[in-house]
Image (tube, grey):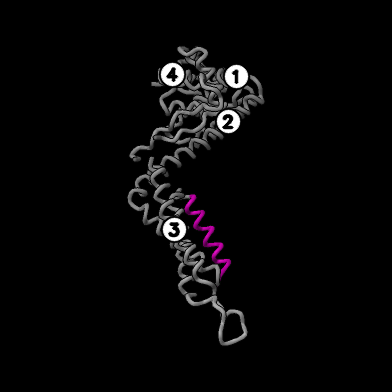
Amino acid sequence: MRPAPGRQSRGDGRESAAHRRARALLARAVARLPEEQHDWGEAMLAELDQITGRVGALGWALGGFRLTWLARRQRRGRKGDAVMAISRRRTGWSAAALWALWAAITTLLVFEFPTAAIVFGLAGFGLARFLRVWPEGVGALGGAGAICVLIGLLNLGGGQPCSSSRASSCGGVAPLPLLIAGCLLIAASVALYSVTARQAAR
Amino acid sequence: MPRRSHISPQTVRLLQALLARPGQWHYGYELSKQTGLSSGTLYPILLRLADQHLLETRWERPQRPGLPARHTYRLTADGRQLAIERLAQPPATRRAPARPAPDGAA
């Protein structure tokens, strides 16, 4: 069992005001450390007695906040890794399909509601960053590809010279490039997701 | 094969300091002075090395009553071996030890 750590002052009444302030500051940082890493904060507190200068003591105390920030971030990452390890096994392809749907809806929104498309798109990226689902994000390519194919199919016969008027075209777009691009995007998304999911699982 | 990340220059400095007297227990402030690392840089590295079982830690009883117990550190056998290997490599090819896979991960 470890001896009582150094949260309290050295107890001989010789601690300077600067050291007291630094100790109070560091104690605040230590209090925010995850429980399992509390010893590291106490270790920093104990070392404060060895520091003689005012600036040094303050600098040492401020380091406690960085330790706390990094420890909390690491813990969040571990939780996220564990959650993703489970969810990826169960829902990897479903999540990629959801990404494809998200991309398709965003692309469709662009034509009528550009602002909503931007908000929807940014929200999707924010969610992906929060959930750490980047491999599945490749599915978005598939969604964009599906929209290309859809537009291509709706324009079958379009983009041709119009025989009944002097206009150079009867409207619409040439479907072939869209169909080719759409199919390529869908194929690329499936292939890329297979590769990235395999790499992420290693 | 697990992904391996580059070892930071700060970690190299710390490993050098720990390896200078490998059997001896080191204090945090002493390591900070030897390496020139601030506490906010030093302790996260110590924590990570201890997590990877490359560093042993222990609380040392105070030398005088009224003083707090101090946390001390030294490299484990694995840590020593890894430090020797990494420090022997030219700087451009130094790699940090792979992070252990999270529990339950494939």
What kind of residue is marked 3?
Trp
Tell me where residue A38 appears, x and y as whole percent.
46, 31
> Under tag 3, what secondary structure?
helix
Q: Which residue is mark 1?
A: B33
Mark 1, other Cα within 10 Å: few <14 / some 14–19 / many ≥20:
few
The reply to whether callout 2 and callout 3 are in contact (CB within 8 Å) is no
Identified at 43% across, 34% down, the residue is A35
Q: Which residue is mark 4?
A: B81
Q: Nearer the viewer, residue A94 or B14?
A: A94
Separation of marks 3 and 1 at Cα, in angstroms: 51 Å
Identified at 52% across, 77% down, the residue is A158
Tell me where residue A24 appears, x and y as whole percent.
57, 31
Q: Nearer the viewer, residue A7 or A167?
A: A167
Q: Tell me the subunit letter for badge 3.
A: A
Tell me where residue A37 appears, x and y as whole percent.
45, 31
Total labels drawn: 4
Residue A13 in sight in this render: no
What kind of residue is marked 4?
Gln
Q: Which residue is mark 2?
A: A63
The reply to whether callout 3 and callout 1 are in contact (CB within 8 Å) is no
Q: Tell me the subunit letter for badge 2.
A: A
Q: Tell me the subunit letter for badge 1.
A: B
Q: Which residue is mark 3?
A: A99
Identified at 46% across, 59% down, the residue is A184
Q: Going from the N terminus, do you reach mark 2 or mark 3 first?
A: 2
The reply to whether callout 4 and callout 2 are in contact (CB within 8 Å) is no
**Residue B92, quarter of picture:** top right
> Under tag 1, what secondary structure?
helix
Residue A24 lies in the magenta stretch? no
Chain part drawn in magenta: A112-129
> Under tag 4, what secondary structure?
helix
